Image (cartoon, helix red, strand yellow):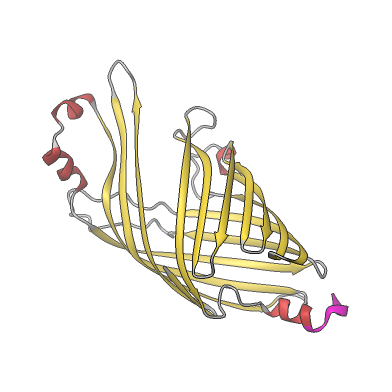
Amino acid sequence: PSVYFPGFSLGYLYSADFHLIARNLAMPQVETRYVVDRGVVGGFAFETRGITRRHSLRLGTTVKWIERRGLDRTLKLTELIAADTTYLKSLIGSPQYGWGFGLGIQYDILLGRSDNLTLGVAWQDIGDTQFGGSGVASRPASQKSNLSVGAAYEHEFGNSRLGRTALLFSFDMRHLNMTEIDPRLRLHGGAEVKLGDISLQGGIFQDSFTAGAKVDFWFLEVAASTYAVENQSLAMLNRERRYMVQITMKLDIEGKKGKSRIDEDRKRRPRNF
């Protein structure tokens, strides 16, 4: 659940990630990831004028406190044979805590009464988010830092019976701070059709097609998607199809849904746009 205010948001986070990947039939190894996160996330942002009156600059930061429990490691044949409940619990260990920080910049360019171009840079989990001290025997996996750049173009058709109707195209490059990733796995692009509170999405995630849909019930947002990820550092070697359902509870107090300064200007002085 999240609460949105003008320039500020606060939310509670709970997520779980679990998967097993078996490799090498002759000498079996199992890549195991079991991670459960919960914590509090806060965000701060403000908007100011850009180079011209039709431009807007937005700056934001996030701070999160996360409790993480789990493991992310490869279990060898000898470990698999001897593994029991007690051994697996010892690998998981006790919950550990960590602080994470992120920064973001958006530059919004109004191209006309119905067209917007947005450029952005985001840096998540700056310096990697670590959990537990260096003396902890079974520390959960850290959350790796992610530096991204992107652009989005939106055309608004106006209002229909369903509400605001728009078409959005976006493209971004992720993990720019990590040199070991195949450049093809950094690229993401897609399109979104907004029909009021319903959104339909499709595009490319890494080197695979992705699709999804989202429905906004004001205080509850439900999203479902399918995508594929590569389990190797090179593209098209070990692709895995995944499915996701996300439910978000939210309370918006003239925050996320509130109009920006440039939107208010466009409404009051349409001839200038």
Q: Residue reaching furthest front?
A: 161
Indicate yes or no whether the magenta region holds residue 126.
no
Q: Residues in magenta?
A: 268-273
Residue that appears at 67% across and 59% down: 194
Locate residue 24 relative to residue 235 in the image: left or right. Answer: left
Q: Magenta region, mostly helix, strand or loop?
A: helix
| Farthest residue, direction right | 271
Q: Nearer the viewer, residue 261 or 15?
A: 15
Task: Pick whichever, 179 or 263, lies toward us.
Answer: 263
User: Which quadrant of the figure contains the C terminus?
Assistant: bottom right
User: Would residue 62 be found to the left or right of residue 156 on screen?
Assistant: left
Residue at the extreme left: 86
Give the residue displayed 47% in from the left and 59% down from the top. Answer: 124
Image quadrant in which the N terminus is located: bottom left
Q: Position of residue 72 (x, y in %)?
A: 30, 42
Q: Is residue 263 left or right of residue 61?
A: right
Residue at x 46%, y 62% (from the top left corner): 248
Image quadrant of residue 155?
Answer: bottom right
Describe residue 29's horizontal placement relative to residue 269 as left or right.
left
Q: Position of residue 119 (x, y in %)?
A: 67, 61
Q: Between 251 and 43, which is closer to the camera in this rendering?
A: 251
Rendering quarter of residue 86: top left
Q: How many marks?
A: 0
What percent of the width, then of the height, locates residue 48? 65, 79
* Residue 147 image position (x, y, % from top left): 52, 55
